[in-house]
Amino acid sequence: MFHRPPDPTRREAETVTVTLDGRPVRARTGDTVAAVALLAGLDHTRTNPATGERRAPYCMMGTCFECLMVIDGEPSRQACLVTVREGMVIERQHGAPRLR
Amino acid sequence: MPGVRFGPDVTGAAFCPHDGCANPLRLLRALHAAMQRHGAAYRPDAPARAVRPDGEGFTADTPAGPIRATKLVLAAGHGTPALADALGLRVPMRAERGQIMVTERVQPYVPLPANGIRQTADGTILLGTTHEDVGMITDTTLAGEATIAANAVRIMPDLARARVVRAWAGLRVLSPDGFPVYHQSERFPGAYATICHSGVTLAAVHANDLAEAILAERPPDTLRPFAPERFDVPQAA
Ligand SMILES: Cc1cc2nc3c(=O)[nH]c(=O)nc-3n(C[C@H](O)[C@H](O)[C@H](O)COP(=O)(O)OP(=O)(O)OC[C@H]3O[C@@H](n4cnc5c(N)ncnc54)[C@H](O)[C@@H]3O)c2cc1C
Ligand code: FES
C-alpha cells in the first residue's frame, strides 16, 4: 500500500532491524515506528478499546492518537513520534492496554 | 484486591462493605429520566436571578419570566448564599477545590473503588483528589496533579503504565464544619435551603427523609442538628 519515494540524494541509508509483531523488519535510521509499520504493510496498528474497530496512523504528527502501539513493552506510545532503534520490539495494541 | 500489586509503603487497608462507586454520566442520565417520569419540569433556560416571597408563596425571577411556587427549596450549591437572604435563610459556605485526573482506558485492574483510585466500567481510572482552599477557582495545577500521581503510583506502582488523558477540578460545597446544612426559614416557613458535601453518598437520605420532612413542613428530630444555629456558638480558642 505504502512505499518509500526514491531518495533524491541517492545516499546509501543506514539501516536498523526491529521486531514488528514478532517478525524482523529492516528500517532506516530516522524512520518513525508508524512509517515502518505502514511500509511493512500493516493495515491497522491497534484496535479501539471501546469499539474494537481497527485503527491506523492518521495524522503522522502527534495530534490524533490513532497510532498507539506497544513499543519495547510500553503500551499506548504514539508510533508517529517515536523513531526506530536497533533491536526495538514493536507490537500492535489490541484493545485497552494491560497494566501488568 | 485480587490482581493488584501494592507498593512497599502499603502496610494495611480498611474495607467498608458499604462503599461503592456511581458513574457520574449514568447517574445524571438516571436522575433526568426519573425527574421526567415524576413530571418534574427541567428548566435550564431559567436560572434564578432572584427569589422573593410574594405574599402567598414565592416568585423566582428568571430570564424566561417569573416562576411561582407555594414552596421553595434552594439547592443551588455555591449559588445558594446569593439567593438565601431574601427568604430569611442563612447558609454559611466555603469552597474547597478538588482536582481529579483520569487515565486512558485500560484492562480491568482495580476491582474495588478505593479512596483516590477508582476504575470505571469503561476502563478509565480516576485518580485524586486534592483539598485546596483557593476560593472559586477551578484551574488545575501541575503541582496538584503531580501529588495525585505520586500518591497513586506509591500505592499501586503498576498505575505508572497508564497514560493520563485529562484533568479537571471541582469546588466542594462545604459548610464551616463540613456537614450538611438543612434550613427551614422561620420568617417564611415554605422556604428551605439545603447544601451538602457528599451529595451522592447522602442521596438516599435526601430523597427519602429530607424530601418527606419538606413535604410535611417540619424536620424530624434526626435532621434538626443540621440547622445553621449550630454555627452560632463562640469558637473555642
Ligand atoms: C472533587 C470532588 C469530589 C467529590 N467526591 C464525592 C464523592 O466521592 N462522593 C460524594 O457523595 N460526593 C462527592 N463530592 C460532592 C458532591 O459532588 C456534592 O455534594 C454534590 O454535587 C452537591 O449536590 P447539590 O445538588 O447540592 O449541588 P451542586 O451539584 O453544586 O448543584 C447545584 C446546581 O445549582 C445550579 N445553580 C446555581 N445557581 C443557580 C441559580 N441561581 N438558578 C438556577 N440554578 C442554579 C448549578 O448550576 C448546579 O447545577 C465531590 C465533590 C468534588 C468537588
Ligand atoms: S498518527 Fe496521529 S498521533 Fe500519531
Image (tube, coloured by chain):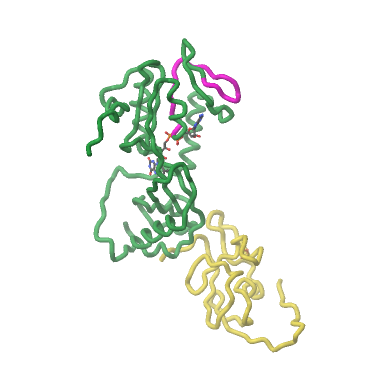
Chain colours: A yellow, B green
Taking depth in this image into account, of B209 and B50 the one nearest to the observer is B50
| Residue B171 point in image, percent of width and height | 44, 42
Relative to residue B131, is residue A20 drawn left or right? right
Q: Image height check: is B209 above or below A83?
A: above
Residue in the image at 43% along x and 20% along y: B87
The span shown in magenta is B60-77
Q: Image height check: is B13 above or below A32?
A: above
Q: Image height check: is A14 above or below B147?
A: below
Query: What quarter of the picture does the C terminus of chain B occupy?
Result: top left
Q: Is residue B19 magenta?
A: no
Relative to residue B181, is residue B138 drawn left or right? right
Locate residue B182: give its quadrant.
top left
Residue that lies at the very extreme toward the front in this rendered image: B237
Taking depth in this image into account, of B170 and B82 the one nearest to the observer is B82
Residue that lies at the very extreme toward the left in this rendered image: B236
Relative to residue B19, is residue A56 drawn left or right? right
Residue in the image at 59% along x and 70% along y: A81
Q: Is residue B73 magenta?
A: yes
Residue in the image at 53% along x and 57% along y: A49
| Residue A41 point in image, percent of width and height | 65, 73
Taking depth in this image into account, of B223 and A64 the one nearest to the observer is B223
Locate residue B159: give its quadrant.
bottom left
Q: Image height check: is B205 above or below A18?
A: above
| Residue B152 point in image, percent of width and height | 37, 59
